[in-house]
Image (tube, rainbow, N blue to C red):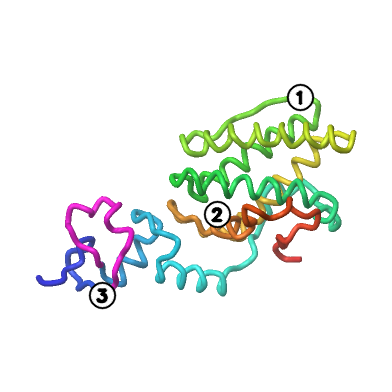
């Protein structure tokens, strides 16, 4: 059958797929798929590039129809309304670090980032209680990001101490991590290979010559 979709092998191809060559259907030699397989396999079995026009349209559609989560991640962690203004440098710095890491390590997906934020939040919860326990994420990309994020946070805490003479409390780091986790709960779409949330964080990346991140965070708390 001419122009047959290499995924379903039934319907005609109508959409160019820039991620098809990196999928398990690459041996087909095709470059296009049918609209139904595009919708079903997008960010699932196909690692879609961020500039794919169909992916951009799908993310826009998801954004218009999304509903607030029924339960917030780490619901018992309170984040006051003035927390962003007071700790914007910590939140912005961490979000920029995560975005840059994912930009340099292209195998990192939203699922990895959320697993890292979960693990960091649990670690800082125990640290705030006077104990320390950690359970790193299992996937290799998430574990690399987790280890790098711990180093970043330690360096941030050290620089904060040297600059201001005051320490960053574990509960403050916990709230910053939980804020980003809740934002991910709002932005991520749950697809295995999605980078929808990471795309949002990359929007926070300043130009290389830009000044350090301002104290006021541009990120918006979902539902506020």
Query: Helix, strand, or loop for circle 2?
Result: helix
Give the residue at x 80% y 51%: 79
Identify the mark at residue 14; answer none if there is no mark. Answer: 3
Q: Earlier in the sequence, mark 3 or mark 1?
A: 3
Of the pair 220 and 95, the residue shown nearer to us: 95
Q: Earlier in the sequence, mark 3 or mark 2?
A: 3
Q: Which residue is mark 1?
A: 131
Q: Number of callouts in the render?
A: 3
What crowding class fits label 2: few (fewer than 14 Cα within 10 Å), some (14-19), or many (20 or more)?
Answer: many
Q: Earlier in the sequence, mark 1 or mark 2?
A: 1
In the image, taking residue 11 as reference, residue 65 lies left or right, namely right
- In which quadrant will I find the C terminus? bottom right
Q: Which residue is mark 2?
A: 198
Query: Helix, strand, or loop for circle 3?
Result: loop
Of the pair 121 and 74, the residue shown nearer to us: 121
Range covered by the magenta-colored residues: 15-32
**What is the spatial separation of the Cα atoms under label 3 and label 1, in whole angstroms?**
57 Å
- In which quadrant will I find the N terminus? bottom left
Of the pair 136 and 163, the residue shown nearer to us: 163
Relative to 145, say whether 19 is above or below. below
Relative to 204, say whether 11 is above or below. below
């Amino acid at each position: 059958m001419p122009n047959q979709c290499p995924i379903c092998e039934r319907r005609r191809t109508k959409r160019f797929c820039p991620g098809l060559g990196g999928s398990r259907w690459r041996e087909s030699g095709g470059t296009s798929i049918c609209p139904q397989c595009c919708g079903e396999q997008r960010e699932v079995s196909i690692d879609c590039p961020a500039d794919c026009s169909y992916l951009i349209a799908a993310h826009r559609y998801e954004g218009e129809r999304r509903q607030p989560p029924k339960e917030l991640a780490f619901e018992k962690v309170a984040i006051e309304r003035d927390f962003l203004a007071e700790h914007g440098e910590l939140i912005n710095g961490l979000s920029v670090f995560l975005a840059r890491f994912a930009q340099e390590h292209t195998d990192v997906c939203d699922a990895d980032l959320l697993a890292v934020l979960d693990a960091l939040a649990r670690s800082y919860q125990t640290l705030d209680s006077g104990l320390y326990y950690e359970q790193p994420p299992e996937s290799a990309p998430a574990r690399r990001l987790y280890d790098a994020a711990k180093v970043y946070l330690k360096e941030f805490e050290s620089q904060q101490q040297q600059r201001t003479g005051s320490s960053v409390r574990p509960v403050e780091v916990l709230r910053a991590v939980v804020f980003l986790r809740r934002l991910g709960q709002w932005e991520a779409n749950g697809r295995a290979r999605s980078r929808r949330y990471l795309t949002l964080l990359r929007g926070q990346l300043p130009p290389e010559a830009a000044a350090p991140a301002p104290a006021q965070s541009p990120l918006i708390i979902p539902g506020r």
